[in-house]
Amino acid sequence: EADIYQTPRYLVIGTGKKITLECSQTMGHDKMYWYQQDPGMELHLIHYSYGVNSTEKGDLSSESTVSRIRTEHFPLTLESARPSHTSQYLCASSEQSGLPEAFFGQGTRLTVV
Amino acid sequence: GESVGLHLPTLSVQEGDNSIINCAYSNSASDYFIWYKQESGKGPQFIIDIRSNMDKRQGQRVTVLLNKTVKHLSLQIAATQPGDSAVYFCAERGSGNQFYFGTGTSLTVIP
């Protein structure tokens, strides 16, 4: 079992609200990632980080923002949620060296009404 | 929510048969590939990986084949079991060390 945790697992929120999806890992991994996945669809990289104070945008444009103040924590924030943000958000982490595989959290299923 | 990609292809196999799941990747410079299994309501889980300097790698009941000429990966599952029913994704590691996922395949095992 990977030691990477996402909260909340499920979230239903009204349009215009600010939300933060939490992701934490206890493996000491430098690299962390956020993916967006609609039901039955592909995973698309929306943000990634190489380490503390490093954040980059992925290949899918997203209105969300991320921060990486601590190695273990990589929260994703939507300043003003919209129904188009309804999706599943998956967080992952991997080592800078050594085993390069990415470990995934359970995901947060977000519904904006 | 707005769709962000294609609907997944599906594969149905009888329990006990072998399964072959295929994946095309896009970047000829990718040096590392992983197959993930995603069960309903869960995040993807690592199955097997392969580096670009290899053509084949075997695990327990699974084999990954890499054809760099045509940028193609396949995952072979021997003696498929009902617990193998899931969505399978291949992922490639890009030049920036981030992982990009291919279109997954939904595998259904018929008892």
Image (cartoon, rainbow, N blue to C red):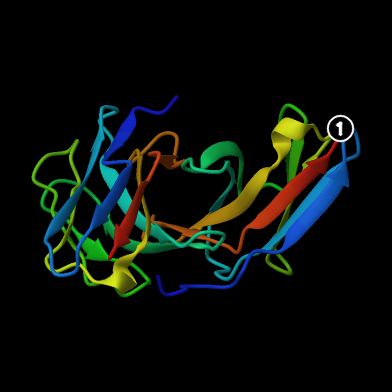
Q: How many discs appear? A: 1
Q: Is residue A77 above or below residue B7?
A: above
Mark 1 residue crowding within 10 angstroms, few (<14) / some (14–19) / many (20+): some
Q: Is residue B8 shown to the viewer in this render? A: yes
Residue A101: x percent and y percent? 47, 41
Q: Residue at horizontal 40%, vertical 39%?
A: A106
Q: Secondary structure at mark 1?
A: loop
Q: Residue at horizontal 40%, vertical 70%?
A: B1
Residue A60: x percent and y percent? 37, 72
Residue B38: x percent and y percent? 56, 44
Q: Is B104 left or right of B20, judged from the image as shown?
A: left
Q: Quadrant of residue A92?
A: top left
Which residue type carries mark 1?
Answer: Ala
Please give the residue where the numbered disc 1 appears in the rendered image: B79
Q: Is residue A93 above or below residue B52?
A: above
The quadrant of the rendering that contains the C terminus of chain A is bottom left
Judging from the image, mark 1 belongs to the subunit labelled: B
Q: Is B20 left or right of A48, judged from the image as shown?
A: right
Q: Quadrant of residue A72?
A: top left
Q: Is residue A24 above or below residue B51?
A: above
Q: Residue at horizontal 53%, vertical 65%?
A: B29
The quadrant of the rendering that contains the N terminus of chain A is top left
Residue B75: x percent and y percent? 74, 47
**Front in this rendered view, residue A83 or B19:** A83
Q: Is residue B58 shown to the viewer in this render? A: no
Q: Residue at horizontal 32%, vertical 55%?
A: A110
